[in-house]
Image (cartoon, grey):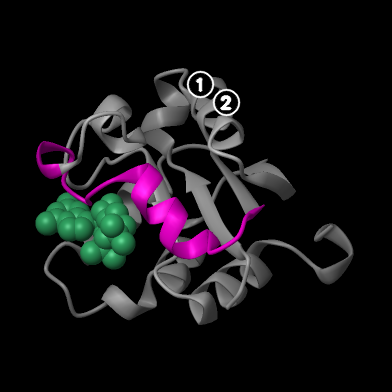
Amino acid sequence: MSNRTFTMIKPDATRNGNTGAILQMINAAGFRIVAMKMTRLSKEKAGEFYAVHAARPFYGELVDFMSSGPITAAILEKDNAVEEFRKLIGATNPAEAADGTIRKLFATSIGENAVHGSDSNENAVIEGDFFFSKLEQF
Ligand code: GDP
């Protein structure tokens, strides 16, 4: 069982000034930040990151949104990190997200939903390595 997951604070949350509040919730929930950077995905890079969704009807919208402004990418450490972080962020659609979750508090729609969280240990490693070299992972 891996103790790391990968997250992005998405362009909507960045634009709305929620980066600090979200990082505070992440820390308060017991996650340790072991890599972090603010950056902006090109359309090409966003398409590559979400390639698994290429056949979905919302893919174009997702790529446009994720390249629309800066994001904060981070690798987080905690026991059972992937599952624990999915609990902290809540359901993909904020209308279905539990009270107190990051998406309930900060997401505006199913597409513009404030944060990303890896869905498996395997993807956590792939996604972390997409943004950070081994020298940048502490
Ligand atoms: P996640 O694991 O909870 O992020 O959800 P998914 O893996 O199913 O989808 C990846 C991302 O695609 C979501 O976080 C949303 O930003 C976006 N997305 C998912 N469903 C929709 C949709 O129906 N419409 C739009 N515009 N975006 C969506």
Tell whether circle 2 marks a residue whose Cβ is less than 8 angstroms from ligand 1. Answer: no
Which segment is the magenta one?
76-96
Measured as percent of width and height from the top left, residue 80 is found at 53, 64
Q: Residues within 10 Å of mark 2 (few under 14, many from 20)?
A: few
Residue at the top extreme of this rendering = 17
Q: Residues within 10 Å of mark 1 (few under 14, many from 20)?
A: few
Q: Is residue 30 above or below residue 130?
A: above
Measured as percent of width and height from the top left, residue 39 is found at 63, 44
Measured as percent of width and height from the top left, residue 57 is found at 11, 68
Q: Is residue 109 above or below residue 35?
A: above
Task: Describe the element under mark 1 as helix, strand or loop.
Answer: helix
Q: Quadrant of the N terminus?
A: bottom right
What residue do we see at 43% from left, 24% from top? 15
The residue carrying mark 1 is 21
The residue carrying mark 2 is 24
Task: Describe the element under mark 2 as helix, strand or loop.
Answer: helix
* Res 12 → quadrant: top left
Mark 2 touches mark 1? (CB < 8 Å) = yes
What residue do we see at 83% from left, 70% from top? 134
* Res 68 → quadrant: top left
